[in-house]
Image: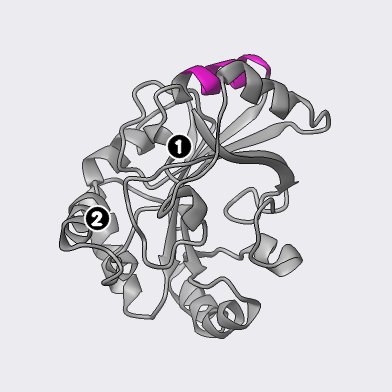
Amino acid sequence: MLISEIFYSLQGEGELTGVPSVFVRTSGCNLRCNWCDTPYASWKPEGTQMTVAEIVAAVRAYGAAKHVVLTGGEPMLAKEMPALAGELKKLGYHLTIETAATIAPDGIACDLASMSPKLSNSAPDDRLSDAWREKHEALRWQPAIVRAWIDRPQQDFQLKFVVAQESDVAEIERMLAELERPIPSAKVLLMPEGTSLEKLRDRAAWLGELCKARGYRYAHRLHVELYGNKRGT
């Protein structure tokens, strides 16, 4: 599969923020989010072809690691992803899959499904063709697939939304209602959109208060705080 990067860092987002983890970033995505912070794995996919065995060996080189994050791009696009997840699970790793939840799980090994359904604020601008913009809009929200991930008894889940403005929360709540599932508010993580500390802190001022009022979890971006917006972090 095409691998953009493999690195060891601290989980920067979600319920496992701060946990040392090996990140396996696949290259390739079926969406084109306008604010994407990893364009080298989505808008312009680049990387190296690696076998499952080569990826597992690279992960095992980080001897202290107990957690692995399969991310992208969209990792579920890779045909070999179920085989990779299965091998890593056999070795005892805790597996997080970071996905936009547009592709069904179909039995893949996973401990934490970290789903990030895309809001209308993700729509690509005129850098892309009308065909790509239409594809993105048609694909970005797949409630039946999100339900399929949520309903798996062998794993935990979180729903992580990128918030750019206060009105985004009304859209999030409409999406949650469409799921027709009793989603605990603590499983709904609201993350400010931005790749700089200045922008994140500006949005945190009102987003934190909104989370307090609605009972949702505020999702910090620890890796940006510690390392800035750069690869390998």
Could you tell me which residue is drawn at 39 percent across and 20 percent down?
Answer: 107
Vertical position of residue 204 compared to residue 220: above or below: below
Query: How packed is label 1: few (under 14 Cα within 10 Å), some, or many (20 or more)?
Result: many
Residue type pointed to by label 1: Pro
Query: How packed is label 2: few (under 14 Cα within 10 Å), some, or many (20 or more)?
Result: many
Colouring style: one colour
Is 89 part of what is drawn in magenta?
A: yes
Pinpoint residue 33: horizontal percent, then vertical percent: 36, 61
Q: Which mark is residue 75?
A: 1
- Callout 2: SS: helix
Vertical position of residue 123 compared to residue 149: above or below: below
Horizontal side, residue 43 vs residue 205: left or right: left
Could you tell me which residue is drawn at 19 percent across and 52 percent down?
Answer: 135
Q: Quadrant of residue 197?
A: bottom right
What's drawn in magenta, residue-wise? Answer: 83-91
Horizontal side, residue 135 vs residue 68: left or right: left
Q: Which mark is residue 119?
A: none
- Callout 1: SS: helix
Pinpoint residue 36: horizontal percent, then vertical percent: 45, 62
Residue type pointed to by label 2: His
- Residue bearing mark 2: 136
Pinpoint residue 211: horizontal percent, then vertical percent: 49, 72
Give the Cα separation between the discs numbered 2 and 1.
Answer: 17 Å
